[in-house]
Amino acid sequence: MLSRWLVLSALVVVLDQVSKVWITAHFVFGERLYVLGVFDLVLAHNTGAAFSFLSEAGGMQRWLFSAIAVIASVWIVWLLRKHSAQTLFALALSLILGGALGNLVDRIAYGHVVDFLSFHWNEHYFPAFNVADSAITLGAGLLILDSLRSTRHTGH
Protein backbone atom coordinates (compact mmCIF):
# COMPACT_ATOMS: atom_id res chain seq x y z
CA MET A 1 0.00 0.00 0.00
CA LEU A 2 2.91 2.36 0.67
CA SER A 3 3.95 2.32 -2.97
CA ARG A 4 0.69 3.85 -4.21
CA TRP A 5 1.14 6.81 -1.89
CA LEU A 6 4.73 7.29 -3.00
CA VAL A 7 3.61 7.14 -6.64
CA LEU A 8 1.09 9.91 -5.89
CA SER A 9 3.85 11.99 -4.29
CA ALA A 10 6.06 11.41 -7.32
CA LEU A 11 3.21 12.49 -9.61
CA VAL A 12 2.92 15.76 -7.67
CA VAL A 13 6.67 16.34 -8.06
CA VAL A 14 6.48 15.65 -11.81
CA LEU A 15 3.46 17.95 -12.34
CA ASP A 16 5.12 20.64 -10.27
CA GLN A 17 8.45 20.45 -12.10
CA VAL A 18 6.87 20.25 -15.58
CA SER A 19 4.78 23.34 -14.84
CA LYS A 20 7.86 25.22 -13.59
CA VAL A 21 9.91 24.22 -16.63
CA TRP A 22 7.11 25.48 -18.88
CA ILE A 23 6.76 28.83 -17.12
CA THR A 24 10.51 29.47 -17.06
CA ALA A 25 10.76 28.60 -20.76
CA HIS A 26 7.96 30.99 -21.74
CA PHE A 27 8.32 33.90 -19.30
CA VAL A 28 11.13 36.16 -18.14
CA PHE A 29 11.45 36.96 -14.46
CA GLY A 30 8.66 39.33 -13.41
CA GLU A 31 6.66 38.94 -16.62
CA ARG A 32 2.91 38.82 -16.03
CA LEU A 33 0.12 37.50 -18.25
CA TYR A 34 -3.38 38.57 -17.28
CA VAL A 35 -5.58 35.48 -17.70
CA LEU A 36 -8.77 36.40 -15.84
CA GLY A 37 -9.92 39.38 -13.83
CA VAL A 38 -8.65 37.69 -10.66
CA PHE A 39 -5.87 35.43 -11.98
CA ASP A 40 -2.50 36.02 -13.66
CA LEU A 41 0.48 33.92 -14.62
CA VAL A 42 3.72 35.51 -13.44
CA LEU A 43 7.28 34.24 -13.15
CA ALA A 44 8.41 34.91 -9.60
CA HIS A 45 11.25 33.57 -7.46
CA ASN A 46 10.86 32.99 -3.75
CA THR A 47 14.03 32.49 -1.71
CA GLY A 48 12.01 32.23 1.48
CA ALA A 49 9.18 30.03 2.69
CA ALA A 50 5.44 30.63 2.50
CA PHE A 51 4.57 34.29 1.91
CA SER A 52 8.31 34.97 1.32
CA PHE A 53 9.09 34.36 5.01
CA LEU A 54 12.86 34.88 5.55
CA SER A 55 13.38 35.74 1.88
CA GLU A 56 15.85 38.47 2.89
CA ALA A 57 17.88 36.24 5.24
CA GLY A 58 21.04 36.38 3.15
CA GLY A 59 21.09 32.87 1.71
CA MET A 60 21.08 30.69 4.82
CA GLN A 61 17.35 30.08 4.34
CA ARG A 62 18.04 27.98 1.22
CA TRP A 63 19.80 25.35 3.31
CA LEU A 64 17.55 25.74 6.35
CA PHE A 65 14.38 25.14 4.32
CA SER A 66 16.08 22.35 2.37
CA ALA A 67 17.02 20.60 5.61
CA ILE A 68 13.50 21.04 6.97
CA ALA A 69 12.07 19.55 3.75
CA VAL A 70 14.39 16.54 3.95
CA ILE A 71 13.60 15.89 7.62
CA ALA A 72 9.86 16.33 7.04
CA SER A 73 9.98 14.02 4.02
CA VAL A 74 11.68 11.25 5.98
CA TRP A 75 9.12 11.63 8.76
CA ILE A 76 6.22 11.62 6.28
CA VAL A 77 7.50 8.43 4.59
CA TRP A 78 7.72 6.81 8.05
CA LEU A 79 4.13 7.91 8.79
CA LEU A 80 2.96 6.63 5.40
CA ARG A 81 4.55 3.26 6.04
CA LYS A 82 2.83 3.06 9.42
CA HIS A 83 -0.59 4.41 8.33
CA SER A 84 -0.86 3.53 4.62
CA ALA A 85 -4.27 1.89 5.15
CA GLN A 86 -5.78 5.14 6.45
CA THR A 87 -6.84 6.53 3.10
CA LEU A 88 -7.56 10.18 3.89
CA PHE A 89 -4.56 10.55 6.18
CA ALA A 90 -2.21 8.87 3.68
CA LEU A 91 -3.61 10.94 0.79
CA ALA A 92 -2.95 14.13 2.76
CA LEU A 93 0.60 13.08 3.64
CA SER A 94 1.31 12.07 0.03
CA LEU A 95 0.28 15.49 -1.25
CA ILE A 96 2.39 17.25 1.37
CA LEU A 97 5.37 15.00 0.59
CA GLY A 98 5.11 15.65 -3.15
CA GLY A 99 4.84 19.39 -2.59
CA ALA A 100 7.77 19.47 -0.19
CA LEU A 101 9.96 17.51 -2.60
CA GLY A 102 8.89 19.65 -5.58
CA ASN A 103 9.99 22.82 -3.82
CA LEU A 104 13.11 21.09 -2.49
CA VAL A 105 14.21 20.37 -6.09
CA ASP A 106 13.95 24.11 -6.82
CA ARG A 107 15.86 25.16 -3.72
CA ILE A 108 18.73 22.79 -4.46
CA ALA A 109 18.83 23.44 -8.22
CA TYR A 110 18.20 27.21 -8.32
CA GLY A 111 18.49 28.60 -4.80
CA HIS A 112 14.85 29.72 -4.94
CA VAL A 113 11.38 28.32 -5.55
CA VAL A 114 9.69 29.11 -8.86
CA ASP A 115 6.20 30.55 -8.34
CA PHE A 116 3.78 31.47 -11.10
CA LEU A 117 0.13 31.33 -10.02
CA SER A 118 -1.09 34.75 -8.93
CA PHE A 119 -4.57 35.53 -7.66
CA HIS A 120 -5.75 39.03 -6.86
CA TRP A 121 -8.78 41.15 -6.16
CA ASN A 122 -8.47 44.59 -7.67
CA GLU A 123 -4.98 45.70 -6.60
CA HIS A 124 -4.75 43.29 -3.65
CA TYR A 125 -2.47 40.40 -4.65
CA PHE A 126 -2.14 37.08 -2.85
CA PRO A 127 1.52 35.93 -2.92
CA ALA A 128 2.30 33.90 -6.05
CA PHE A 129 2.51 30.15 -5.56
CA ASN A 130 2.93 26.92 -7.54
CA VAL A 131 1.67 23.34 -7.92
CA ALA A 132 3.80 22.14 -4.99
CA ASP A 133 2.37 24.83 -2.72
CA SER A 134 -1.14 23.88 -3.84
CA ALA A 135 -0.48 20.21 -3.01
CA ILE A 136 0.87 21.14 0.43
CA THR A 137 -2.15 23.34 1.14
CA LEU A 138 -4.62 20.69 -0.05
CA GLY A 139 -2.80 18.07 2.00
CA ALA A 140 -2.90 20.26 5.11
CA GLY A 141 -6.63 20.81 4.60
CA LEU A 142 -7.17 17.07 4.28
CA LEU A 143 -5.20 16.49 7.49
CA ILE A 144 -7.53 18.88 9.27
CA LEU A 145 -10.56 17.11 7.79
CA ASP A 146 -9.14 13.73 8.81
CA SER A 147 -8.54 15.03 12.33
CA LEU A 148 -12.08 16.39 12.59
CA ARG A 149 -13.52 13.12 11.31
CA SER A 150 -11.41 11.11 13.75
CA THR A 151 -12.45 13.34 16.65
CA ARG A 152 -16.12 12.98 15.75
CA HIS A 153 -15.88 9.20 15.49
CA THR A 154 -13.97 8.72 18.75
CA GLY A 155 -15.95 11.30 20.70
CA HIS A 156 -12.84 13.22 21.83
Image: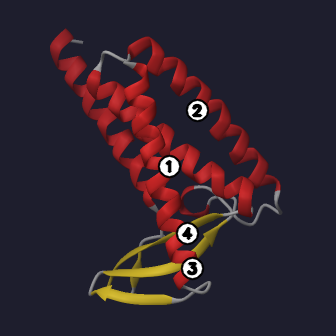
Give the residue at x 69% y 64%.
Answer: 55
Q: Which residue is mark 2?
A: 73
Asked whether the residues under the numbered discs 4 and 3 touch, taking CB atoms below 8 Å apart as contact, a structural biologist would say yes
Residue 25 visible? The answer is: yes
- Name the residue nearer the viewer: 84 or 146: 84
Asked whether the residues under the numbered discs 3 and 1 touch, taking CB atoms below 8 Å apart as contact, a structural biologist would say no
Asked whether the residues under the numbered discs 4 and 1 touch, taking CB atoms below 8 Å apart as contact, a structural biologist would say no
- Amino acid type at image mark 4: Val
Q: Nearer the viewer, mark 2 or mark 4?
A: 4
Give the residue at x 32% y 86%.
Answer: 35
Q: Which residue is mark 3?
A: 25
Among numbered discs 4 and 1, the one appearing first in the sequence = 1
Tag shown at residue 13: 1
Q: Mark 4 to mark 1: distance in Å?
A: 12 Å
Quarter of the image with the C terminus is top left
Tag shown at residue 21: 4
Q: Is residue 149 left or right of residue 39?
A: left
Question: What x and y, as percent, mark residue 43?
Answer: 54, 79
Residue 123: which quarter of the image? Answer: bottom left
Q: Secondary structure at mark 1?
A: helix
Asked whether the residues under the numbered discs 2 and 4 touch, taking CB atoms below 8 Å apart as contact, a structural biologist would say no
Among numbered discs 2 and 3, the one appearing first in the sequence = 3
Q: Is residue 52 left or right of residue 121?
A: right
Q: Nearer the viewer, mark 2 or mark 3?
A: 3
Q: Mark 2 to mark 3: distance in Å?
A: 29 Å
- Amino acid type at image mark 1: Val
- Amino acid type at image mark 2: Ser
Q: Circle 4: is it few (<14), some (14-19), or many (20+) Cα within 10 Å?
A: few
